[in-house]
Structure formats: structure tokens, C-alpha cells
Image (spheres, rainbow, N blue to C red):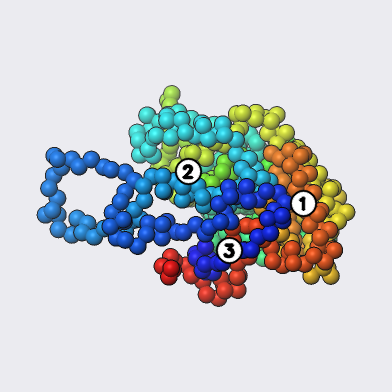
């Protein structure tokens, strides 16, 4: 709250009859009654109270006297708020109830794949044999975990149709960096790193950012009127300075790049590599192997396609699949079969690009993803893609008569709308998205992709039932009707029912308060 630079807000005036979907009860009844203080404020002003702790550690009478360790012994209090265990637990539970979560309702944030995280995955990740181990343990004692990682890599290799998989990257964007560093290493091995990466205008912001971080200039490739890469424009820009072409497929307009094989051919003919952003893999998993399309490097977001938690729920994991041409440059460590065991190879041998991060990757995420793979099986994963596409098309079909869609025809896993249908209503994409919060839904992705004016990108994901899709579509259609009927206050003041009203974005940008400050009481 204060972290976004708006300070405290007064409580909204609520018309209880307007709580159409029981938002107050969704918020546990707490959200509206009180502003949850920061944990530091909860502890109170009395320094004596700050000495309170939730855990009593026994005093060891045998402990060595450390008072002569000058400079090393703490003389002042730690400055942690003194709270008992129930006080701390209640604080965080109250905070969690002020937030939208995938466990509350549909979360249609396009491109982010906010789908259900099966509880089975959580149970597996918490098995003591997998969770109570340490990365510095002798490898002979963690053979099961290394075998699990090996299996995750093997599944990803089979599903992508690509021979090598690097597990270390910690997120999608980190996977992109890994892939581009492998591409850079491959070019450097031939004596010329090249200078440019081509990125279509509809790309996720991480793509140009990654290219820049890997030391490349970024050149945009135009899009056709039907929302795909403009092949002619691409061909005209593919010169000997181009190191790679980065394409998301399905792209961020929710459309399949039908010319992927031709893009690969043109790219390879120019001596460049084809980077496929695989964040949207849930739309094609089990149905298309990107390796067959000619992709040389592709990151997979385990925290999207393979249902590991994200968005505050857990760390990400962005393994990268590599073609035979790039495999030698994979980061370390990699897994080798050694006698009858498995080993994480850490040496500098060969052409490896080196390390992407400490240790081997996000073990908990590998375990969750593996549980997801095994519980679905190959046929179940193909069904995932089918259902993701079916659900998005259902939403598109139900909304398209009222909302305007920039591209005709069926979509893949997400349905894209623009704001031309809001013209003349005085309601903006932002207002509309904020009003959805009052209906008990997280807003869709707004103003992205940038190629579409006032974009609203809806990704329902494959884990939603038809009943939940209908509940969402009914809410969107009712809001659309209200917008067209001139009920502006419902939008420009929204959200009315959330614990906090609309934040002052201008103040947040102009006068950001980025650290905790005591608020006069
Ligand atoms: C989510 C996403 C990314 C980035 O993944 P992170 O794990 O958030 O770094 C990249 N590209 C696309 C298309 C995405 O949807």
C-alpha cells in the first residue's frame, strides 16, 4: 500500500446492495472493515512489546561465553516486530483475504496462464525426501532428486522434440537470456557474435529486454493485418548481422504463427537461430513439437504450462530446450549418467556458456511439474492444449457480438479484444477492467499486446468449467450493457467493493514512496 506511493486511503462508502457476487464474503468480511496495518505497526509503539517473540528458544547453560567477541555480538535489538504466533498468522491470513487468487475465482490474465495448481503437486513437493535435502549434500545421497530432474528434462525434450534441455533458469525471462546466451556462444564459436535480434511488434516485453541484456540491438518486425509475423518484412531484415529471430507461438494475440516453418527456413538460410518463446506452450503441448517447426531454443514456463504456482505463489522455473546445434553451449550443471548413478556435471569442460545461477534450479518446481506430467500422461497433456483452446474460443464466441475483436476467426488459448466497442461511452479499457474487480474477477490483461488499441487479452485457461466461464462471460456482458447504457459512475469510480479504491497512479509515478514510513496516528 504505502509501497506504491499513495499512502493511506479512507474507506470507501459501500452500498451493500451493490455487492452483486458476495464480494464482501469473498473477502472474508475483513477487507472492507479495516485497513490492515503493516506488521511493524501491529506490534505497537511500546518498545517493551517489541521484545515479545512467537517462539521461546531455550537458554543453553553450556553455551560458550561470547561476550569477548568484540564487534560480533549484537548489542541493539533486531528491530523485528514482537508478535505472537496467532497474531502473525492472522495478519497474513487477513492480508491474503484482501487479494484476488486463483483459488477464489477465474483469473483471466492473458499471457500469464493463471490456472489451477493441483494440490497433488503440493503434496509431492512436500515429501520429506524431496524437500528436506540440501544442494550441497553429497550427490550419492540425493540420487532420487537428480533422477527426478533428469525425468523432467526428458519429458520436456520429448514434448518439444528438441534433444537437450537446460533446467537451471529461474523464470521465463531468465530462460530467454539462457537461450540467447547459447545463441551468442554458438555465433562466437564461428568468430562473429553478430549484432541484432529480430522481434515482432506483438512480442512480450521480456523478448526485446532479453535481447538487449544479451548485448544485441533489437529490430522490430511488422505484423500482418491478420495478427501474424509479416514474412516479407522479416525477409527484408534478415541480413548477416542478425543473430536470432524471436517469435512467440502461439503469439500474444492468441494466434498461431502459421508460417513458423517458413520463418525457420528464412532464419537458418541467413545463418541465424530461431528462438521460440514457449511461455504459451499450454496451447500446443502434446499436439505440436516446436523442434519440428525448426525452433533452436525455447524456454518453457513450468509456472504456466505445468501448473506450478506463480504470481506471488512461488518462484518460477524456465527450463530451455535446445536444438542439436545449440546443445553444446547449454549452461552447467547438466546431468550425466555415471556408472549406475546420475551426476550433476559442474566442470568447465566443453563449450558450456557457464552458470545461469547458483546450484541446479528450482527443485520444488521440478517436483510439482513432474507430478503434473505423470498425473496427466501424454494423452492428458494433449487434452490440456485442447481444453485451453476450447475454453478461449468459448469465451470469444460468447463475447464477440458485443466486444470488438481485432482479428477474425478462432483463437488459440486466449481471446483478444480491443476498445473500439467502448467508443462514445466515456468508459476506458482501464475503467472496464477495474469494474470487473467488483464482480469478483481479476481483470484481464490490459493494453497488451501493444499492437492492438486498448487491448483486453482474456486467457481463461483449461482448468475452468463451463459454469465458471459462463459466470465470467455473464459478468462481462452485463458490464458491457451498463457501459453502453451510460452508467459511467460504475466504471470511473471502480472498484467500489475492493478493500482499496482506485489508486492515484499519477501520484504513484510522480512521488513514489518505496519504503515503510511511520504514519501519524
Ligand atoms: C510470461 C511470459 C514471459 C516471461 O516469463 P516470466 O516467467 O514471467 O519471466 C515471456 N514471454 C511470454 C509470451 C509470456 O507470457
Q: Nearer the viewer, mark 2 or mark 1?
A: 1
Q: Is residue 456 left or right of residue 161?
A: right
Disc 2 packing (10 Å; few <14; some 14–19; many ≥20): many
The residue identified by callout 1 is 475
Q: Nearer the viewer, residue 234 or 444?
A: 444
Q: Position of residue 520 (x, y in %)?
A: 43, 70
The residue identified by callout 2 is 361
Q: Earlier in the sequence, mark 2 or mark 1?
A: 2
Q: Is residue 400 left or right of residue 199?
A: right
- Spatial CA distance of label 2 from label 1 is 41 Å
Label 2: state its secondary structure: loop
Q: Quadrant of residue 500?
A: bottom right
Mark 3 and mark 1 residues within 8 Å of each other at the beta carbon = no
- Spatial CA distance of label 2 from label 3 is 44 Å
Cβ of disc 2 within 8 Å of ligand 1? no
Q: Earlier in the sequence, mark 2 or mark 3?
A: 3
- Spatial CA distance of label 3 from label 1 is 25 Å
> Is residue 370 visible in the rendered structure shown here?
no
In percent of the image, x 57 and y 34: which residue is there?
Answer: 119
The residue identified by callout 3 is 11
- Number of labels in the image equals 3
Label 1: state its secondary structure: helix
Amino acid at each position: 500500500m504505502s509501497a506504491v506511493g499513495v499512502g493511506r486511503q479512507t474507506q470507501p462508502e459501500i452500498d451493500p446492495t451493490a455487492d452483486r457476487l458476495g464480494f464482501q464474503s469473498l473477502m472474508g468480511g475483513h477487507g472492507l472493515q479495516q485497513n490492515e496495518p503493516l506488521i511493524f505497526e501491529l506490534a505497537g509503539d511500546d518498545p517493551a512489546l517489541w521484545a515479545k517473540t512467537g517462539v521461546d528458544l531455550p537458554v543453553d547453560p553450556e553455551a560458550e561465553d561470547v561476550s569477548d567477541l568484540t564487534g560480533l555480538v549484537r548489542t541493539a535489538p533486531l528491530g523485528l516486530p514482537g508478535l505472537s504466533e496467532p497474531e502473525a498468522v492472522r495478519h497474513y491470513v487477513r492480508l491474503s483475504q484482501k487479494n484476488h487468487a486463483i483459488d477464489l475465482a477465474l483469473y483471466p490474465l492473458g499471457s500469464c496462464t493463471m490456472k489451477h495448481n493441483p494440490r497433488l503437486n503440493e503434496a509431492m513437493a512436500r515429501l520429506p525426501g524431496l524437500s528436506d535435502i540440501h544442494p550441497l549434500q553429497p550427490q550419492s545421497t540425493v540420487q532420487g532428486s537428480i533422477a527426478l530432474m533428469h525425468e523432467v528434462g526428458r519429458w520436456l525434450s520429448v514434448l518439444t522434440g528438441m534433444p537437450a534441455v537446460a533446467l537451471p533458469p529461474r523464470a521465463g525471462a531468465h530462460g530467454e537470456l539462457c537461450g540467447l546466451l547459447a545463441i551468442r556462444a554458438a555465433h562466437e564459436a564461428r568468430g562473429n557474435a553478430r549484432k541484432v535480434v529480430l522481434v515482432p511488434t506483438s512480442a512480450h516485453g521480456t523478448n526485446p529486454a532479453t535481447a538487449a541484456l544479451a548485448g544485441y540491438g533489437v529490430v522490430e518486425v511488422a505484423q500482418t493485418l491478420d495478427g501474424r509475423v509479416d514474412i516479407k518484412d522479416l525477409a527484408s531484415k534478415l541480413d548477416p548481422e542478425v543473430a536470432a529471430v524471436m517469435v512467440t507461438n502461439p503469439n500474444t494475440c492468441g494466434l498461431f504463427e502459421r508460417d513458423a516453418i517458413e520463418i525457420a527456413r528464412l532464419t537458418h538460410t541467413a545463418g541465424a537461430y530461431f528462438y521460440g518463446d514457449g511461455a504459451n506452450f499450454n496451447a500446443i503441448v502434446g499436439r505440436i513439437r516446436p523442434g519440428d517447426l525448426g525452433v533452436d531454443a525455447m524456454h518453457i514456463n513450468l509456472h504456466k504450462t505445468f501448473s506450478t504456482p506463480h504470481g506471488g505463489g512461488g518462484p518460477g522455473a524456465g527450463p530451455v530446450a535446445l536444438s542439436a546445434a545449440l546443445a553444446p553451449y547449454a549452461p552447467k550443471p547438466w546431468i550425466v549418467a555415471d556408472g549406475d548413478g546420475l551426476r550433476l556435471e559442474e566442470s568447465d569442460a566443453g563449450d558450456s556458456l557457464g552458470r545461469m545461477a547458483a546450484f541446479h534450479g528450482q527443485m520444488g518446481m521440478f517436483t510439482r511439474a513432474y507430478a503434473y506430467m505423470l498425473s496427466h500422461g501424454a494423452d492428458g497433456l494433449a487434452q490440456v492444449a485442447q481444453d485451453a483452446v476450447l475454453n478461449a474460443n468459448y469465451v470469444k464466441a460468447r463475447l464477440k457480438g458485443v466486444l470488438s475483436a481485432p482479428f477474425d476467426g478462432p483463437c488459440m488459448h486466449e481471446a483478444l479484444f480491443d476498445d473500439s466497442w467502448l467508443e462514445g461511452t466515456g468508459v476506458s479499457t482501464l475503467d472496464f477492467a477495474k469494474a470487473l474487480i467488483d464482480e469478483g474477477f481479476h481483470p484481464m490483461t490490459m493494453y497488451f499486446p501493444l499492437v492492438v488499441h486498448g487491448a483486453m487479452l482474456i486467457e481463461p485457461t483449461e482448468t475452468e468449467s463451463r459454469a465458471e466461464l459462463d459466470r465470467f462471460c455473464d459478468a462481462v456482458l452485463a458490464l458491457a450493457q451498463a457501459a453502453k447504457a451510460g452508467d459511467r459512475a460504475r466504471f470511473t469510480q471502480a472498484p467500489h467493493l475492493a478493500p482499496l479504491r482506485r489508486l492515484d497512479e499519477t501520484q504513484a509515478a510522480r512521488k513514489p514512496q518505496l519504503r515503510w514510513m511511520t504514519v501519524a496516528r
